[in-house]
Image: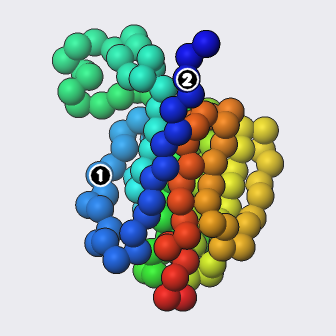
């Protein structure tokens, strides 16, 4: 039996926002809604599936299994939700939307269910990322 490894990722609210890069794998229906993420995860077996070697360095024609969107103070909730819907339309299994100012985490699952949590201490989903926990204990501080 193989040993299951556990991974914990902590978001430090003091760190500057990472520079966002457009993800060409999800076409934007509205040119004002950029398909960008703060964090995404995809199964390693998908990374080079069916892609010409020259294209692998430019874009990945796949959608991540997990899409995480951090709502900044200047972001509109409706636009962030629209961006996540683009991932839903492209078979993303799990989407997390974190609204620090509002103190909520929205969880969108592949079965179309949506769960809204108030300042959860952590997020995880064994079906998509076994052994992974996103530690949010410091994320909600200083609200």
| Within-10-Å neighbours for mark 1: few <14, some 14–19, many 20+ | few
Instruction: Name which of mark 2 and mark 1 comes first in the sequence.
Output: 2
Number of marks:
2
In the picture, the quarter occupied by the N terminus is: top right
Q: Which label sits on residue 29?
A: none
Distance from the alpha carbon under mark 2 to that under mark 1: 35 Å
Position of residue 5 in the picture relative to residue 91 (left or right):
left
Rendering coords of residue 18 (x, y %): 29, 62
* Front in this rendered view, residue 59 or 46: 46
In the picture, the quarter occupied by the C terminus is: bottom right
User: Which residue is drawn at the image coordinates 75% and 64% (left, top)?
Assistant: 116
Dot 2 falls on a residue whose secondary structure is loop
Rendering coords of residue 86 (x, y %): 56, 46
Dot 1 falls on a residue whose secondary structure is loop
User: Which residue is drawn at the image coordinates 46% and 38% (left, top)?
Assistant: 41
Q: How is the image coloured?
A: rainbow
Identify the residue position indicated by label 1 in the image.
21
Identify the residue position indicated by label 2 in the image.
3
* Front in this rendered view, residue 78 or 139: 139
User: Which residue is drawn at the image coordinates 67% and 67% (left, top)?
Assistant: 120
Position of residue 20 in the picture relative to residue 37 (left or right):
left
Rendering coords of residue 132 (x, y %): 55, 42
Does residue 101 show up? yes
Residue 98 vertical placement versus 56 (above, below): below
**Disc 2 or disc 1, which is closer to the eye?**
2
* Corner quadrant of residue 122: bottom right
């Amino acid at each position: 039996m193989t040993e299951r490894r556990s991974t914990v990722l902590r978001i430090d609210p003091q760190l500057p926002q990472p520079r966002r890069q457009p993800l060409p794998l999800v076409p934007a229906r509205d040119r004002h809604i950029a398909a960008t993420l703060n964090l995404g995860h995809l199964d390693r077996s998908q990374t080079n599936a069916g892609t010409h070697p020259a294209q692998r360095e430019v874009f990945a024609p796949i959608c991540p299994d997990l899409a995480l969107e951090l709502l900044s103070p200047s972001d509109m909730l409706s636009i962030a939700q629209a961006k996540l819907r683009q991932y839903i339309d492209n078979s993303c299994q799990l989407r997390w939307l974190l609204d620090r100012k509002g103190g909520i985490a929205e969880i969108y699952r592949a079965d179309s269910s949506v769960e809204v949590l108030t300042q959860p201490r952590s997020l995880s989903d064994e079906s998509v990322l076994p052994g992974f926990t996103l530690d949010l204990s410091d994320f909600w501080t200083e609200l």
